[in-house]
Image (cartoon, helix red, strand yellow):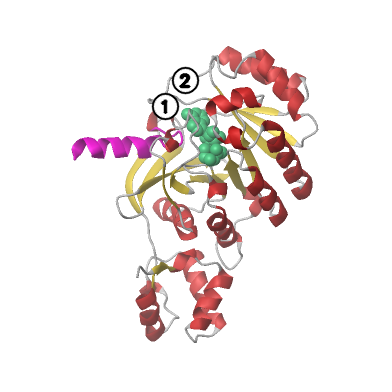
Amino acid sequence: MDKVDLRSFTLEKLKSELENMGEKPFRAKQIYGWLHQKQVRDFDDMTNISKDLREKLKEKYIIKNLKIVEKLVSKEDNTSKYLFDIGNNTVIESVLMKYSYGNAVCISSQAGCRMGCTFCASTIGGLERNLMPGEMAEQIYEIQRDIGERVSNVVIMGSGEPLDNYENVLDFLEIIHSKEGCNLSHRHITLSTCGVVDKIYDLAKEDLQITLAISLHAPNNEIRKNTMPIAKKYDYDSLLRAAKYYADVTKRRVTFEYALIKGVNDGEENAAELASRLRGIMCHVNLIPVNDVRENNYIRSTEENIKKFAQTLKSMGIETTVRRKLGSDINAACGQLRKSYKDRNIKEE
Ligand code: SAH
């Protein structure tokens, strides 16, 4: 049987694992601290754990470390992209963005994705597998080791749909938030979803102080259905009701992401419709100039259109920002580096 990754347990779960081994609960706290505060890579680094217990742990568990396969540093801005090997020829990617307020890391929650959004490179090969909580945390820890600095903000906005890997993502959030662990404030964590409505309600009931970002990308279901298959399962109004519920329960402003694609969703009438739909929801719109993905034919809106779109939203009372384009020289858009790595390797084989 495969050994289980010790880094994937929340403190509570680690306590019961150790209890089952006949160990005292306080050992769990010590081990958890080694894994998530000191972020060690090996059992033998846990110096206050007896050799006996370390050996016992090694029989049953592993500490899963991610290996950096590639690191691309943007020449245009302070963005770096990491490609990690998570075993069995599976790779995932994470992005580091250095801001004046600190280091933000965008992590993947799945290897690949099964949501099928037509503009997104992550979904092209389908879903390979869900990531475990420890594999999500390790993306942050390995980047911290690499740069020798702390990461202050985390966005779950890399490859994958976090709400399609719900239990693991919740455990990951618990691990990086817990004060015995990584001690990151929930307010510094953003989870981005394509709109899995049932799970938005579940997440709202957890009442965490994380920011919910919803990839909306359209002013109505007709347009949304053309690019996002999830819109066939949950219609536009039910998604907006869930967003409002999340904002009302958590008192946190929801972010709507809207990638502007020329001729698809970037007309002024689209902006006006969007603004009227969002009225009454405590929210903010983040406009994203769509990133070119080789496999599709979408073209980014012109600067002028982006500006007009933003102005229309603002004039109708919707708070709006335009996202700076980051790391376009290093394939920083979702799933692009992983995809290009896989293509290169297939060619080489
Ligand atoms: N599944 C989640 C998180 C991963 S995608 C979600 O859908 O939100 C992260 C963000 O990148 C989403 O807003 C997604 O729509 C956007 N995205 C994907 N491909 C893009 C592209 N080519 N250009 C701009 N944004 C893109």
Kind of residue at disc 1: Val
For mark 2, give the secondary structure. loop
The residue lying furthest to the front in this view is 233
Q: Earlier in the sequence, mark 1 or mark 2?
A: 1
Does the magenta portion include 312?
no
Check whether the beta carbons of the residues at disc 1 and disc 2 lie within 8 A of each other.
Answer: yes
Q: Is residue 338 magenta?
A: yes
Picture coordinates of residue 346, whole percent (x, y): 24, 38
Is the CB of the residue bearing disc 2 within 8 angstroms of ligand 1?
Answer: yes
Q: Which residues are magenta?
A: 331-349
- Is residue 73 something one can see in this rendering? no
User: Could you tell me which quadrant the C terminus lies in?
Assistant: top left
Q: Is mark 1 within 8 Å of ligand 1?
A: yes
Q: Nearer the viewer, residue 24 or 159?
A: 159
Q: Residue at x 67, y 52 (%)?
A: 202
Residue topped by disc 1: 293
Residue 184 placement (x, y as % from top left): 60, 56
Q: Nearer the viewer, residue 259 or 236?
A: 236
Residue drawn 46% across the image and 65% down it: 7
Which amino acid type is shown beneath numbered disc 2? Tyr
Neighbour class for label 1 at 10 Å: few (<14), some, many (≥20)? some
Which residue: 56% across, 50% down?
Answer: 152
Location of the N terminus (image quadrant): bottom left
* Image disc number at residue 298: 2
